[in-house]
Image (cartoon, rainbow, N blue to C red):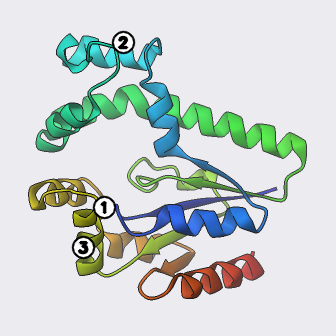
Amino acid sequence: MRVCGLTGGVGMGKSTAAGFFSSRGARVIDTDVIARQMVEPGQPALTEILDCFGRCLADHRGELRRDELARIVFADPVARVKLEAILHPRIREAWCRQIDDWRREGHPLALVIIPLLFETRAESHFEKVICVACASLSQQARLRERGWSDAQIEQRIAAQMPVAQKIARADFVIWTEGLPAVHEQQVTQILAGL
């Protein structure tokens, strides 16, 4: 089984690209989805987060107030490092376990979506790394469409490696300006190269 990492800047089209790979038979796991599962009520990671950052981050149902946690960690690099120390090892263990399962099942291609792939030094786990990217103005416009403020956009972008560095380190690039059909064609070319 070939295992590839998919990365890129926030709002640059990783999920869309992953959908194209999935529609062609690739198994896909998204670390953002894993992260959300890790902080559900009853999960050890949620308990550790609340112990570290305060019980006030749980709402009346015991669910994590994710927006409030994001406000804290994207404004404070030390707090972000603490959160990452709680979540990243658990997330990596989960996707590695899933890859092992798919390998035993004999799937030909697996893709792991990791926004912070290079930042977490995960590249050694993959045969190839694919970077999804677009122009900065497009990225900002897409994030504004999500309802993010300019300050939130600036904080999130600053928390990641510059996309130009990710492009330089990747084996393949999917440029997501233009029509989705163009993105899909790029996926087809990458699959042919794999």
Mark sitting earlier along the chain (3/2):
2
Q: Does 67 sit above or below residue 20? A: above
Q: Position of residue 3 (x, y in %)?
A: 70, 57
Q: Position of residue 127 (x, y in %)?
A: 68, 62
Look at label 3 and name its amino acid. Ala
Give the residue displayed 27% in from the left and 12% down from the top: 60
Give the residue displayed 27% in from the left and 15% down from the top: 50
Q: CA distance from mark 1 to mark 2?
A: 29 Å
Q: CA distance from mark 3 to mark 2?
A: 35 Å
The residue closer to the viewer here, 65 or 29, is: 65
Look at label 1 and name its amino acid. Met
Residue 47's tag is 2
Look at label 2 and name its amino acid. Thr
The residue closer to the viewer here, 46 or 147, is: 147
Give the residue displayed 56% in from the left and 69% down from the top: 17
The residue beneath circle 1 is 161
